[in-house]
DNA sequence: TTTCTGGTTGGTATCGTTAACAGTTCGTCG
DNA sequence: CGACGAACTGTTAACGATACCAACCAGAAA
């Protein structure tokens, strides 16, 4: 027998029709136990395995039991945690996960989504890159369910699971201001990425509320790697009036900035990370829970796949400011009254 | 038009046969430019997208352009880096990646592999869990190409890309011995996992070569999480004769052990990790390059898929012992002659 | 005995696409 | 002027499975 055995090979071996084999393989009722046993023996003997590609073609009403996950980059620890949690839930529901990375490139994002839908995925979970996502409309109209996680996709009416990025950064900057800082650096990726747009707005809002003029020299957008962040920190610290505190917009940027950050400069990172508490000083962070985000997104997606047609929801998960030391280094203004660690 | 448009819808719209549409959609030669333009207009108008499921069914000679990646857990930073690199190469070659986690469970590993092959993946890249992998033989015989990465699968004759785990740990333990340590703790996951078997053998070999009796009280196997590692460190350090140095078998265990490790205990970790150089003391590590491992594995797999039938290869990538401080803390024996940092 | 159940089993069409081959329409050349 | 090849387009039959319905069989009811 060359190649994989087919249902008809099993049928011949067991002396029944392919229809009976189909019924046995799919565990349907209405097959005599003796017949089923014969078929099962033939399946084992030939090492038969159902061909899900052919199966899916015929069962047009049925699902492919595959979902697509599109992230910027799986190597990013935050996204890795998201991917892992999603895979876990998908597995429990008998689904597979196709994974694709956009690498922050809108064209690649489109390619990946097209490849997903060409394979008839039942649904899509994505962390949208920068740029419009209206190109997803046709896929959505054809029945592919879509959920955004971590980032919203403006202009696309889909379920979205995010944290309050604006509020979290606003709180962190208020925290720094309360510890006497007025010149606060901001490190972020491109503003066009939803999360970074929100985080930057939160930064500006907190400064504005404190009556501090935002100094564009302390702000760096478009940082896509730890090396970028390291260069940015070095640059803004060597200006005539350097910041006394720095806020890193995500884990990757924090890990890049920390090695070049002089002692005495206050620091808060968006995203908690391994060993943050082991550094000197321990690093104050805005923690979010990637597993909870992913779990929510996956459950939402599967609910949609199984027929939930209620209006799109936006789920906002909590963040937590964890003061560990680096964010409580006093600035020139000293500790303001009424603040606490 | 309900649901996605089919080739026949495009054909009707353009006033041609489905065969002509097929030719245009696949960019085949031999279609008059005017006809092709009409078809392309119809494709755009209807938002047609080729159905790769049906396509794959018909093109039996052809490939699914999908590979499966099975790892313990994508959230593990080492595996995340591997996954990311593999996805990148697959994308460049127009392939998709199905991802599955075994969670160190042989049964789940089987389920995932079965789901992969049922979807007709062209090849599999896996980091085998503990236990026999002979169950992969039938899939292999039916033509699925298999490559192991990071861990070998004893009993399965396939391409394998690994590092010299035995040699790397042997070197690290020699390094500790050279710095005066005779009581060295070992933290590892289950010995049945190939890498940890090798690493433990390397540990024993180095001790043996130095004339040191291995003390089983200093060895902990089966640690599957950072919390496990933390408990294990605490336990072996509270024995009557505690170790003066500890070796952590991978990144996850190192990250768990470090917070509970007292100052003055020497420490070496398998796998480099973010901020290792920023801790006090900076952490000495055995570094390996997950991207290089993954790249090699992916290239090997695609070569096989495209017809390479040479005998299975074992590629051994280099590791590097990076002394940063924690591994050079002197032990009770002091620095031995002839050793250097 | 005949008809009627209900439980099993099989036949046929079909999912959306492509392989293989069969036309069709030209222009061109003997 | 009719045949011939080149260029293009269409027809039919699969790929491997399932949906749908028909057929079969034994035993029960009439």
Image (tube, coloured by chain):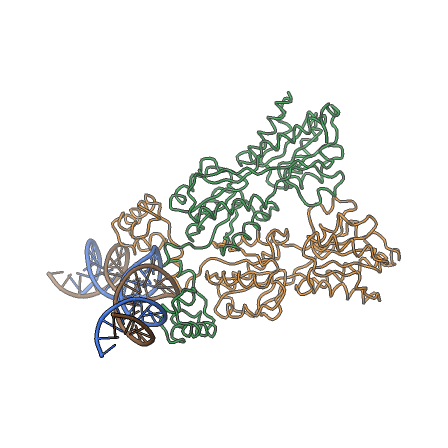
Chain colours: A orange, B green, C brown, D blue
Quarter holding residue B209: top right
Count the labels in the image: 0
**At x 71% / y 45%, what residue is drawn?**
B275
Left or right for A207, reference A158: right
Q: Which residue is at the front of the view, B267 or B336?
A: B336
Quarter holding residue A146: bottom right
Q: Which residue is at the front of the view, A332 or A337?
A: A332
Seen from this angle, which residue lies furthest top? B211
In this rendering, the answer to whether B295 lies above or below D15 is above
Locate residue B171, reporting x and y percent: 64, 30
Locate residue B337, reporting x and y percent: 73, 23
Locate residue B53, reporting x and y percent: 41, 60
**At x 37% / y 49%, what residue is drawn?**
A49
Left or right for A63, reference D23: right
In which quadrant of the rendered image does the C terminus of chain B lie?
top right
In this rendering, the answer to whether A113 lies above or below B63 is below
Quarter holding residue B43: bottom left
Locate residue A111, reporting x and y percent: 53, 62
Q: Which residue is at the front of the view, D12 or B270?
A: D12
Left or right for A92, reference B203: left
In which quadrant of the rendered image does the N terminus of chain B lie?
bottom left
């Amino acid at each position: 027998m060359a190649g994989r055995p087919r249902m008809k090979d099993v049928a011949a071996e067991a002396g029944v029709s392919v229809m009976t084999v189909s019924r046995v393989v799919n565990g349907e009722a209405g097959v005599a136990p003796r017949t089923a046993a014969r078929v099962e023996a033939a399946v084992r003997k030939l090492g038969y395995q159902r061909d899900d590609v052919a199966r899916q073609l015929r069962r047009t009403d049925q699902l492919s039991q595959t979902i697509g996950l599109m992230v910027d980059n799986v190597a990013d620890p935050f996204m890795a945690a998201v991917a892992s949690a999603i895979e876990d839930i998908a597995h429990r529901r008998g689904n597979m996960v196709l994974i694709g990375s956009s690498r922050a490139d809108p064209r690649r994002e489109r390619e990946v989504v097209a490849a997903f839908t060409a394979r008839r995925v039942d649904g899509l979970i994505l962390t949208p890159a920068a740029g419009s996502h209206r190109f997803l409309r046709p896929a959505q109209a054809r029945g592919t369910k879509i959920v955004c996680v971590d980032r919203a996709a403006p202009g696309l009416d889909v379920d979205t699971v995010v944290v309050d990025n604006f509020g979290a950064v606003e709180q962190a900057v208020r925290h720094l201001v309360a510890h006497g800082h007025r010149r606060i650096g901001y490190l972020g990726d491109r503003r066009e990425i939803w999360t970074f747009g929100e985080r930057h707005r939160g930064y500006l809002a907190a400064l504005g509320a404190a009556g501090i003029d935002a100094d564009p020299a302390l702000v760096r957008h478009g940082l896509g790697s730890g090396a970028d962040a390291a260069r940015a920190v070095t640059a803004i610290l060597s200006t005539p009036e350097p910041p006394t505190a720095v806020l890193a917009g995500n884990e990757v940027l924090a890990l890049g900035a920390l090695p070049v950050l002089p002692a005495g400069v206050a620091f808060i990172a968006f995203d908690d990370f391994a060993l943050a508490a082991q550094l000197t000083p321990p690093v104050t962070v805005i923690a979010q829970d990637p597993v909870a985000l992913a779990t929510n997104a996956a459950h939402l997606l599967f609910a949609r796949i199984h027929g939930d047609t209620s209006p799109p929801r936006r789920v906002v998960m909590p963040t937590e400011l964890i003061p560990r030391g680096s964010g409580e280094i006093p600035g020139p203004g000293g500790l303001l009254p009424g603040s606490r660690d």
